[in-house]
Image (cartoon, helix red, strand yellow):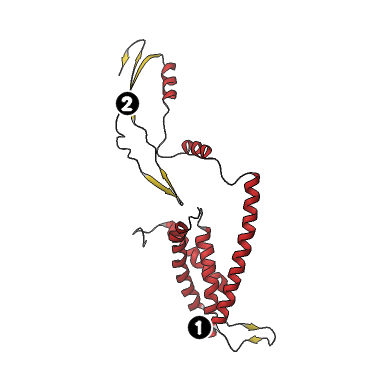
Amino acid sequence: MIKRKKTSLLGLISGVIGGLVTVTPGAGFVGVPGAIIMGLIGGVACWWGVTYLKRMIRLDDSLDVFGIHGVGGIVGALLTGVFTDPALGGSGIYDYVTNSVAADYSIITQVWVQLKAVLVTIVWSGAASAVIFKLVDITIGLRVSEDDEREIYEKSGSDYQTVRLEAVKDALQKENITGMTVSEVRGFGRQKGQRSYTEVRSTGWIIFPKLKLKWWSTITKLI
């Protein structure tokens, strides 16, 4: 809504999930006011992650997994160290030695602990994912070739589909059309070229010039 000046169902659902992901690390540790604040901050952080961060680092993430779950999880883990403070409505840190809540709570100390846990998680997940991606790449491959991708795209139900002249000629011959003249008509009519963006890749529409066909049958002349 902030960027495009209108709401969308996808944005609504992404915002709700972003807030939920952000507050999840603090479940059982933060109070209601802290959870609400974490959800609001997480929604803004996830919006920034899927809108700007993804394009900045050129991330191929069609489902916005990193922008929502990654960014939201990191923000939530750090904010848990803040709102766990009993002075902010949190539960504090339970001391299992004395079976009681620790009397002294330091936000800075706990945020530092949370940050170290986040870094360890990033390194572990990144290394494991790199190994899995490499195994998939050397076995079945991560992506199809450009030719296969173009062929699949042309066969999909897109707004612009090319009509091959040979197919038209074959159909006319089956109807006993014995002669045909093809002349090029400049211009694209109302089908203006445009550029669309799929994730971080820009795709230009290829719209061919119009062709004017004149054909004759063995019975009558058709124009």
Q: Nearer the viewer, residue 58 or 182?
A: 58
Q: Quadrant of the N terminus?
A: bottom left
Q: Quadrant of the C terminus?
A: top left
| Residue 155 image position (x, y, % from top left) | 48, 36
Q: Amino acid at mark 2?
A: Glu
Pointer 2: what residue? Answer: 184
**Residue sticking out furthest to the bottom:** 103
How crowded pointer 2 is (Cα within 10 Å; few <14, some 14-19, many 20+) is rated as few
Q: Which label belongs to residue 118?
A: none
Q: Amino acid at mark 1?
A: Leu
- Quarter of the figure with residue 164: top left
**Residue sticking out furthest to the right:** 97
Is residue 215 in view from this perspective? yes
Per the image, label 2 sits on a secondary structure element best described as: strand
Left or right? Give the position of 140 relative to 32. right
Going 54% across and 84% down the picture, which residue do you hit? Answer: 86
Going 46% across and 71% down the picture, which residue do you hit? Answer: 41
